[in-house]
């Protein structure tokens, strides 16, 4: 409005000068007329520039475009993250599995140059629900702008705190890997957190396809799964079993469970399997750590048995290249971390932009087979 007032006064003054010139009260070539014309042009330029600046945010677009010509290191998203320095995110994670450690590293990488303060609260013991509940309570006290949660389980205590974060503290929560029971949220009229994970069922099918293609005949297959109450392990196991039966009808499938996801436990289980069974055509492990543990027992007996892991961590890639392990299922941990970062940006930073990911309550990442061919061997 102040621009319009200045413009209006300028027009009135111009009319007054024009009338005075017409009446020959002042000369048309005089200093007053010249000064008035200059002032009018300066005023018009001022009004036009700052009106457009407010309307189209010229300072945010024109200046960065100019700057990008002289400095190739200009960050294109500077406008998007102009308020990110004051934002904080807490990640309550598991930390004792290779997958969790990889996710930790890739999340750090994704948030590295964003200006968002990312803080980790790691739970050291895999199945310690009380520890994770305690970490979540700590996180709420700090009142971050968002919480990333890698649940230990779909425990009611954990769900209650997540509901409290969403409803009372108004803190958005994103879950990764294990999914919380959505029914518990709907029963309390709360929309469940956005969930990002690899497609476990498809991953199990991919593992079975790799195994069937390698063995090529009806056989005797063993699964070293994770804990019995692990949703992701059970889903991978069921998918593998169904796909093997479809591809190699008449095959026998045997399953052994671990208490945790440890390498040593997998080695001990594989030793027992080798003692009891003289014929073993293939072993599928519910994660790469278990696969590497199983390999240790097999190598001790100087045997060669096809092993397939799950996750695609760096440690197993070397074993695949060396031909010691048949393959793994790449769950694209880096891509999952990038999706988490994108959702965070949509939730707490890019509030004026159209929402793409945060409108999807379940964001599955399609896994891929990881074998020697994919690794360029």
Image (tube, helix red, strand yellow):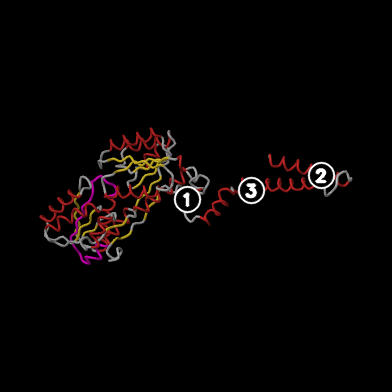
Question: Is residue 228 one of those drawn in magenta?
Answer: yes
Q: Are marks 1 and 2 in contact (CB under 8 Å)?
A: no
Which is more N-terminal, label 3 or label 2?
2
On the picture, is 312 further left or further right than 272? Answer: right
- Residue at 29%, 56% (x, y): give it: 312
Q: Which residue is mark 3?
A: 52
Q: Nearer the viewer, residue 250 or 7?
A: 7
Query: Which segment is the magenta one?
Result: 210-232
Residue lying farthest to the right in this orientation: 23
**Disc 3/disc 1 C-alpha distance (Å):** 29 Å
Name the image quarter holding the C terminus. bottom left
Q: CA distance from mark 1 to mark 2?
A: 54 Å
Alpha-carbon span between mark 2 and mark 3: 26 Å
Q: Position of residue 51 (x, y in %)?
A: 65, 46
* Residue lying at 47% horizontally and 46% vertically, measured from the top left: 346
Residue 66 falls within the magenta-colored stretch: no
Q: Label 3 neighbourhood size at 10 Å, few (<14), some (14-19), many (20+)? A: few
In the image, 48 versus 370, the foreground residue is 48
* Label of residue 15 in the image: 2
Q: Nearer the viewer, mark 3 or mark 1?
A: 3
Q: Is residue 60 above or below residue 189?
A: below
Q: Nearer the viewer, mark 1 or mark 2?
A: 2
SS class, disc 1: loop
Could you say which is closer to the camera, residue 72 or residue 110? 72
Considering the numbered disc 2 on the image, is that residue within a helix, a strand or a loop? helix
Where is mark 1, residue-wise? 356
Q: Nearer the viewer, mark 2 or mark 3?
A: 2
Residue 145, how many percent across, how many down?
Answer: 43, 39
Mark 1 vs 2, N-terminal side: 2
């Amino acid at each position: 409005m102040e621009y319009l007032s200045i413009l209006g006064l300028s027009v009135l003054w111009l009319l007054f000068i024009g009338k005075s010139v017409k009446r020959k009260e002042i000369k048309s070539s005089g200093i007053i007329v010249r000064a008035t014309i200059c002032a009018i042009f300066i005023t018009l330029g001022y009004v036009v520039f700052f009106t457009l600046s407010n309307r189209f945010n010229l300072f945010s677009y024109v200046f960065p475009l100019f700057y990008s010509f002289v400095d190739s290191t200009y960050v294109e998203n500077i406008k998007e993250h102009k308020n990110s320095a004051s934002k904080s995110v807490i990640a309550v994670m598991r930390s004792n599995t290779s997958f969790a450690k990889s996710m930790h590293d890739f999340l750090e990488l994704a948030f590295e140059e964003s200006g968002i303060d990312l803080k980790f609260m790691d739970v050291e013991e895999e199945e310690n629900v009380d520890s994770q509940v305690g970490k979540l309570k700590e996180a709420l006290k700090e009142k971050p702008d968002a919480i990333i949660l890698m649940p230990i389980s779909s425990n009611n205590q954990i769900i209650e705190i997540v509901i409290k974060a969403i409803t009372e503290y108004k803190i958005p929560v994103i879950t990764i890997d294990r999914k919380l029971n959505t029914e518990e949220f709907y029963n309390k009229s709360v929309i469940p957190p956005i969930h990002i994970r690899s497609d476990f069922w498809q991953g199990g099918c991919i593992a079975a396809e790799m195994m069937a293609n390698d063995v090529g005949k009806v056989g005797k297959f063993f699964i070293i799964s994770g804990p019995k109450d692990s949703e992701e392990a059970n889903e991978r196991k069921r998918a593998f079993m169904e796909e093997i039966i479809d591809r190699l009808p008449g095959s026998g499938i045997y399953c052994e469970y671990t208490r945790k996801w440890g390498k040593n436990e997998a080695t001990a289980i594989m030793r027992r399997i080798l003692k009891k069974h003289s014929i073993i055509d293939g072993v599928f492990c519910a994660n790469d750590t278990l696969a590497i543990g199983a390999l240790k027992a097999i190598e001790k007996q100087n045997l060669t048995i096809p092993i397939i892991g799950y996750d695609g961590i760096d440690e197993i890639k070397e074993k695949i290249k060396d031909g010691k392990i048949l393959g793994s299922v790449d769950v694209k941990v880096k891509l999952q971390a990038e999706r988490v970062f994108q959702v965070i940006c949509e939730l707490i930073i890019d509030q004026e932009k159209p929402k793409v990911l945060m409108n999807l309550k379940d964001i599955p990442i399609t896994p891929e087979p990881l074998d020697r061919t994919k690794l360029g061997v």
